[in-house]
Image: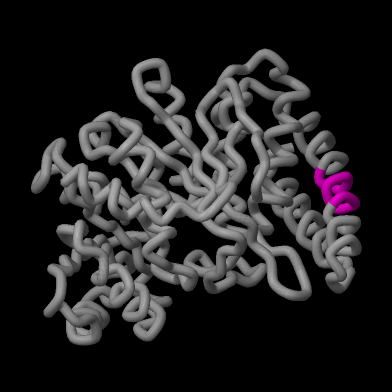
Amino acid sequence: MSDFFQSNQLTTLQRLRPNPQLEEEVTQTQRKIVVVVPCLASHYKPEILRKLLECITTVSCISEIVVVLNGSAGELESQDSYLAQSVAQDTLPIKILLCEGLGKGRAMKTGFDYVYRRYNSTVIVVTFDADFQSFSKEYLFRLVYPIAVLGGQANKGYYARFSSTTLNGRLTRLLVFPMLHAIQEQCPTSDLNRWLLSFRYPLSGDVALASEILPHLKLEGSWAYDLSLLHSLFQHKDNTSIFQTDLLDNYEHLHRDLSGDRLSGLLDAFDDISTYLIRLFPIDHHRLIRDYSNLAHTYCDKYEKLRLFNGMVTSGRDRQFVSHFLDHLNSRGEA
């Protein structure tokens, strides 16, 4: 997504052309990388995770891969040995941590605590989701370059997400952005809201962090982890160099359905994210739901035009998602 867009809140690094020097420049800094991968025990896909880990192990400056398996005690017991057997560890150390309980944030905190205890302030921590299917060396080095070479402490990746027929990234497109703009209607001078709106993909799971900032992060244990990370960075942004980086043209991973499944469904992720955002700002809930509804349907119109422009199939799926989200908000009594 080559452009020159910059925010006064942080530095945005767009991919304008190939840069074959990325790997060499990162490697020359001699700062090692630790990769943290959160993985739900009940939805563990051995072939996908194995492929991701095999790709990561080809990068010489990675010291260790930390896979955090989280779920119920029974799920962890049944999957732990299976996971250990299914991932090859002959090329690079792979540490498997068990984290009882649900929530991506809980798994991330477990991984970060381990990394800081072992490496203190000496490494760059990179996070990938376990279902990530678009890994490449260039992708990794674009993510760590702002920290290894440019001296940053945090870098949030962004990308487009679409298929040949439709747009993906539903929670970002249809929840986070219209809700942040609805909050802006009530909190027009909020620096935090402006900060969150500066990120081009706030729910991106691809992040690089200098390990020295890990103890300062206050992270949600739920699906609101990604937003809580941005909130923590906001609290330290005056003393922290923060980037967002264009990583690739199209990100591919496994897609969740519109169900209430606590582990894989979108509605519980919606619950966690919307509840977290509402908690951050002094807003009237009646007005928020009304403004969110208007803005979300406006976004649906915009995305329908974007589909037409790119020759994609048009459908009412976005409006169905918004309708479900609104029903869910109202049923929770937020209004």
Position above or below: 155 against 308: above
Coordinates of residue 315 in the picture (x, y in percent): 88, 69
The residue lying at 54 percent from left, 35 percent from top is: 12
Q: Using residue 3 as the reference point, say whether residue 65 is left or right of it.
A: left
Position above or below: 269 against 213: below
Q: Nearer the viewer, residue 303 or 97?
A: 303
Q: Nearer the viewer, residue 164 or 287?
A: 164
Res. 103 visible in picture: no
Q: Using residue 264 as the reference point, say whether residue 76 is left or right of it.
A: left
The residue lying at 24 percent from left, 47 percent from top is: 112
Q: Work out which residue is located at the far left of the displayed protein and give it.
A: 118
Q: Work out which residue is located at the far top of the displayed protein and give it.
A: 189
- Image quadrant assignment for residue 120: top left
- Image quadrant assignment for residue 325: bottom right
Position above or below: 130 against 29: below
Q: Main secondary structure of the magenta part?
A: helix
Residue 297 within the magenta-colored segment of the rendering: yes
Image quadrant occupied by the C terminus: top right
Q: Which residues are magenta?
A: 296-302
- Image quadrant assignment for residue 289: top right
Coordinates of residue 43 in the picture (x, y in percent): 42, 76
Res. 15 visible in picture: yes
Q: Nearer the viewer, residue 1 or 175?
A: 1
Coordinates of residue 140 in the picture (x, y in percent): 37, 57
Residue 146 within the magenta-colored segment of the rendering: no
